[in-house]
Amino acid sequence: MSPSIASRKRALFCAVPIGVVLFFLPLVIAPYQVTLLAYGLIFAIAALGFNLLLGYTGLLSFGHSAYFGMGAYAVAFVVKYLNITSMEVFLLGGTLASATIAALFGFLCVRYTRIFFGILTMALSQVLWSLAFKFYWFTGGSDGLRVPTPSLLGVAIPEGQDKMIFLAHRYYYYVLVIFLVGVAVMWIIVHSPFGKTLQAIRDNETRAEFVGVQVWRYRWIAFVVSGIYTGLAGTLWVPLNGLTTPDILHWTFSGKIVFFTVLGGFQTFVGPIIGGVVYNYLETYAVGYTVYWQMVLGVVLVLLVLILPAGIAGTAGRLVPKLRRAA
Amino acid sequence: MILLETKSLAKCFGDMQAVNHVNFSVAQGELLALIGSNGAGKTTLVNLISGLIHPDSGTILFQGADVTATSVHDRIRAGIARSFQLVTVFDQLGALDNVELAIFSRDAKTRRLFSLASSDQAVRDEAYEVLREFGLEDKASQAAGGLSQGERKLLDVAVAYALRPKLLFLDEPTSGVSTREKAPIMDIITSIVRSGKITAVVIEHDMDIVFRYSDRIVVMHEGAILADGTPDEIRRNEQVTTTLIGTSAPDDSGMESHA
């Protein structure tokens, strides 16, 4: 069997049971837990997009809040100015808005690398944050904008149904399907000739140029795809949260996306997915248990960098073969 | 037939005239050795021709067309490829992936986002064939970063070769490998270059290698061409002997700057 077929089989072997578990989980856990899982899957989509840049292209963005925020604010604008509450229109609007901003910002940023790239992405996202904050007559300022529960495939929330039940059931499945499709598409992208080219650029930019790759164009396309994924996450997040505020455009939110990805492990495909889900639980429970929750997250981050720099998935990937040999 | 020609090509780094109005030419089908002591301007000349840096003045003609102002990308499309003195392979990708990438790029397939690289059987077969020619087929699935120095040197050349260039520059293909490994590496490279009818320019410090493998030798000294001729002519050239042997024994320290 060729290695490619083996790796495809292995990917399916891992993905199918996890998909089945995610499908049946809402039947056995409480609605609140299901919404937490939905948040986790959404963060996983954001991290998956972010990692196309960090893990595969070698560019550390500190401005991905911009695309998450654009995805969310586009939804709020569709509601406020067009009076539409269809989730499909939300997705269209969110994707277009985040793609446009990512194309514009990416065009400016991809000519730089390392710290210059990071600072520039952060500065541009802060511009959007300040616009959302100051143009309150348009964006709701620090109060933000409300987003009602949308209709899914033309079906609105049944009269009298608890919003929480709707979000924990139908909306969860809606998110789950988009998540699964998103993961599959990203898996194909990173294993495509394009994805290999990004990895080549990450490993050696000069060499990539000398096999005929126009480096900045590939970085730009990767940037846009990455922005679309993170924007999609923002679009899915806002109906669940019910409100969008400038917080999600602030650079500290970009920091969170970096955190998810490093937590899960940016050198693996599944790392950011695990990181998104785990971080969401970690933050939720840390906030629930202590007022010093930020300190808890800080300690986790320090331990992560010092002890598990490969993240959860990277460390597991190294431990499993060792355990097998020991057994 | 002249494949490549430079006319009065010049490049300064500060006060140092790295390449001093050089008229250099490569004929179709030859294997040319570019020699000279460290700092003679060999790598700078190759960097200028391959497009890594731009000249202060002068022109570069490839197949009669002026390519002086064109991008690296355009020069590769035209058929100029190179390897590097300090090995440059894609360390985290497998050896096969390294070669496949060059083929995807050559065939303008790198913009395919939604098809699996591994499902392109034609590219895969060709990449295996290239690895086989370079004796690296056993290393296909190994990460390039984990290969030995000699294997990485060969892979670097294999990646450039997979672009199917008309003119291939090899910047010290045997630097940093043991003396024992040098001849086998050069045997592989020269047999591939000759059987593929590729014109090649090799920068090399090891005089045994130079005299054994090349058709023509160009000697550079202090940014200018000192001598140009067949191995026999160069061997008999007293000016070359005093300049080269007098100032620098064969040297493979790899210290020459890339810039």
Image (spheres, rainbow, N blue to C red):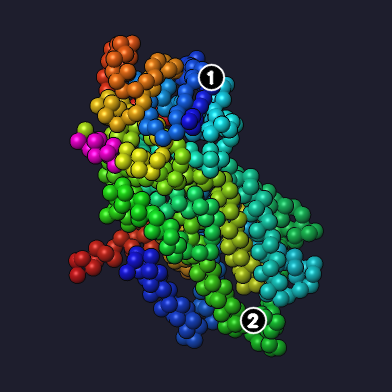
Q: What residue type is labelled 2?
A: Lys
* Nearer the observer, A106 or A28: A106
Q: Can residue B13 be seen in this view?
A: no
Q: Which residue occupies 34% across, 60% down?
A: A315
Asked if residue A70 is positioned above or below residue A11 in the image, the reply reads above
For the stretch drawn in magenta, the main secondary structure is: helix
Instruction: Compute the Cα span from label 2 to label 1.
Output: 78 Å
Position of the C terminus of chain A, as image quadrant, is bottom left
**Residue B3, magenta (yes or no):** no
**Relative to the observer, which residue lies in front, B97 or A263?**
B97
- Along the horizontal axis of the image, is A93 left or right of B118? right
Q: Residues within 10 Å of mark 1 (few under 14, many from 20)?
A: some
Q: To which chain does the residue with label 2 belong?
A: A
Q: What residue type is labelled 1?
A: Ser
- Please provide percent x and percent y for residue A264: 43, 61
Q: Nearer the viewer, residue B24 or A28?
A: B24
Q: Mark number for residue B8?
A: 1
Looking at the picture, does residue B223 appear above or below residue A209? above
What x and y, as percent, mark residue B151?
29, 44
Q: How crowded is mark 2: few (under 14 residues within 10 Å), some or many (20 or more)?
A: some
**Compared with residue B33, is residue A122 higher up or lower down, i.e. above or below?**
below
Question: Badge 2 is on which residue?
Answer: A163
Residue B183 is one of the magenta-drawn residues = yes
Q: Position of residue A300 (x, y in %)?
A: 42, 58
Q: Nearer the viewer, mark 2 or mark 1?
A: 1
Residue B150: tell me if it is visible. Answer: yes
Q: Which residue is drawn at 26% across and 29% down?
A: B212
In which quadrant is the N terminus of chain A drawn?
bottom left
Label 1 residue SS: strand
Q: Residue at x 34, y 20 (%)?
A: B37
In magenta, the rendered stretch is: B180-188
